[in-house]
Amino acid sequence: MEEWRPIQGFLGYSVSSFGRVRRDSTGRIISVKVNQYGTPHVGLMLKGIQRRRSLAKLVAKAFIPNSNEFFDTPINLDGDRLNCVVENIMWRPRWFAIKYNRQFTQKQWPLPIGAPVRAIETGEVFPGSFEAACRYGLLERDIWESVQNGKVVWPSYMTFELA
C-alpha cells in the first residue's frame, strides 16, 4: 500500500513509498525529469523559486533511516534509477554509489560468476554474483573476490561461496 510523507523543507509537498511526489493542495503528481547524469529529479517550489531534488534522495530521506552520516547517497538496487520505490533504495557513501551505478552502465567487471552463489551468513542462494550484488547493494567484483578467497564484502560484512 502506498504511504505518503511530507517532504522536509518543502511545505505542501509529499513523497510516496512508490517514488511519486505530489503537491498536497491539489493532489497533482509532479512529473519526473532526468538530468544529464541520468538522475531522476522533480522540481519543487520554495519561496517562489523552483528547486530540483533527486527523487531517490527524497524517498530515502522520508522512508529509510540512516544512522551513518557517511552513507549520504541512495542507490537503486536493481540499477534502474527510475525505479524509486522504497524497497529498491539503500543508502551508501557517494564514492560507492558511483561504482555501484557503473556496474549497470559500463559493465566494467568482465568476470561475473554465472554459477549459483550462496550468502554464507543467510544461506540465500542466487543464480549468480550479479543477482547477489543487486539484492544487498554490493559490488559484484567484491562478491567475486569473496567467492575466490573468502574476503568479507563491505559494507554488509557478508561472505559468499559457490552453492
Image: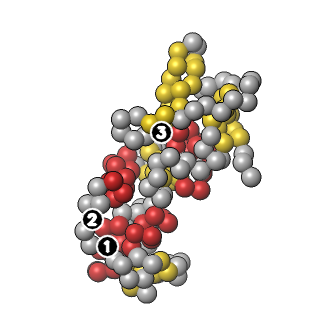
In the image, which disc is placed on residue 40?
Answer: 3
Q: Which amino acid is tagged 3? A: Pro
Q: Residue at 57%, 18% (x, y): give it.
A: 46
Above or below, 99 against 127 in this view is: above
Residue located beneath label 1 in the image: 112
- In this image, 160 relative to 19: left or right? left
Q: Earlier in the sequence, mark 1 or mark 3?
A: 3
Q: Which amino acid is tagged 1? A: Pro
Query: Are discs 2 and 1 less than 8 Å apart at CB?
Result: yes
CA distance for labels 1 and 3: 28 Å
Could you tell me which secondary element the residue under label 1 belongs to? loop
In the image, which disc is placed on residue 109?
Answer: 2
CA neighbours of label 2 inside 10 A, class few (<14), some (14 to 19), many (20+): few
Looking at the image, which is closer to me, 24 or 11?
Answer: 24
Q: Residue at 35%, 67% (x, y): give it.
A: 140
Q: Earlier in the sequence, mark 3 or mark 2?
A: 3
Q: Quadrant of residue 15?
A: top right
Can you give x and y, in whole percent of width and height, for residue 22 in the image?
66, 32
Above or below, 62 against 126 in this view is: above
Q: Residue at 61%, 31% (x, y): give it.
A: 30
